[in-house]
Amino acid sequence: MFATTAALVTSVLLGVQDPQIEALTDLVHELRSEVSELKNKQSKSWISAQRADEVRELVSDILADADTRSNLQGSAALAGYDGGAFLKSTDGNWSVKINGLLQSRWLYNKADTQTSQHGFEMRRTKLTFSGHVVDPSWTYKISPTWSRAGGSNTLDAYIQKKFDDGSWFKFGQFKANFLRENIVSSSKQLTVERSMLDNAFTYGWTQGVELGWKNDDVKIVAQYTDGPNQSNTVALQDPVNAWTVRAEFRFGDAGWKDFN
């Protein structure tokens, strides 16, 4: 368009004096330079926009590939220590915590009619795996243990479902709610060992189902089990089925966890 205009201006002014023609010619050259410069700028701008589109497409492909690789590798997990070494999913719906207990002791036994005896032993050796699955309301606990004689066994092995109203349902192998002394974990006893009374009358671990409920002041637990000391047994072994019901009332400012 500018070139056509310049040509027309030149042809119309052929009869004008030479100085004027030269001035107009210079103006035409100047206009041509400006038009050429504008064309170059537009070309560079178009190239930049095209490159920007290509870069966007490349970034999108890279992100899509990274997302695919991430899905193939599985979800990320969180790890750390909070009352035990733990590993859990980022959404908080799956977790496992690992705890352990080692209790070693030296014993000395002396009686008038017997030869004195003494020595070391591993009173308790156990691991505990606990956490939740699917969501935090479904909890589990598995506790393998090793006896003083060297054999292995299982203490806790249960799954528990908690409800919003403070109730819960548990099934598997767990400790019976009978004597308070036995309910408190061996890792939290205030003396060297539980009393002889507990040793004689405790229910110990058993297999069955449990239904419980608690609020800030009251806790009630009912269990239907195979009877006392029926851990690691088979179903058709003629167990003595038993009901165990325990109610606790809390006074003061301490929470239920302070009594575990």
Image: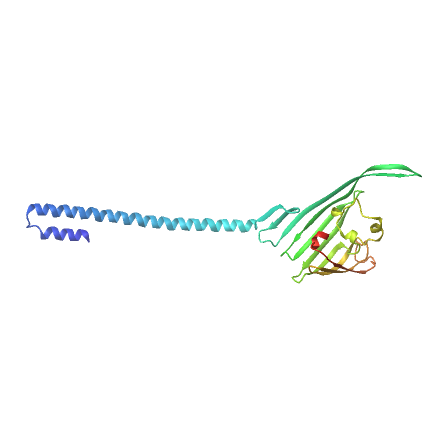
Which residue in the rendered view is the most extreme toward the bottom?
Answer: 165
Name the colour scheme: rainbow
Q: Is residue 79 visible?
A: yes
* Residue at 22% over, 47% down: 36
* Left or right side of 2 for 207: right
Front in this rendered view, residue 87 or 162 = 162
Q: Is residue 232 visible?
A: no
Report x, y in % for residue 52.
37, 49
Report x, y in % for residue 72.
55, 50
Front in this rendered view, residue 8 or 102 = 102
* Residue at 75% over, 54% down: 174
Which residue in the rendered view is the most extreme toward the front?
Answer: 252
Report x, y in % for residue 70.
53, 49
Quarter occupied by the N terminus: bottom left
Report x, y in % for residue 204.
80, 53
Front in this rendered view, residue 161 or 29 = 161
* Residue at 43% over, 49% down: 59
* Left or right side of 132 for 49: left
Total number of numbered labels?
0
* Left or right side of 167 for 176: right
Where residue 159 sits, quadrant-wise, is bottom right
Q: Is residue 81 above or below residue 239?
A: above
Front in this rendered view, residue 39 or 260 = 260
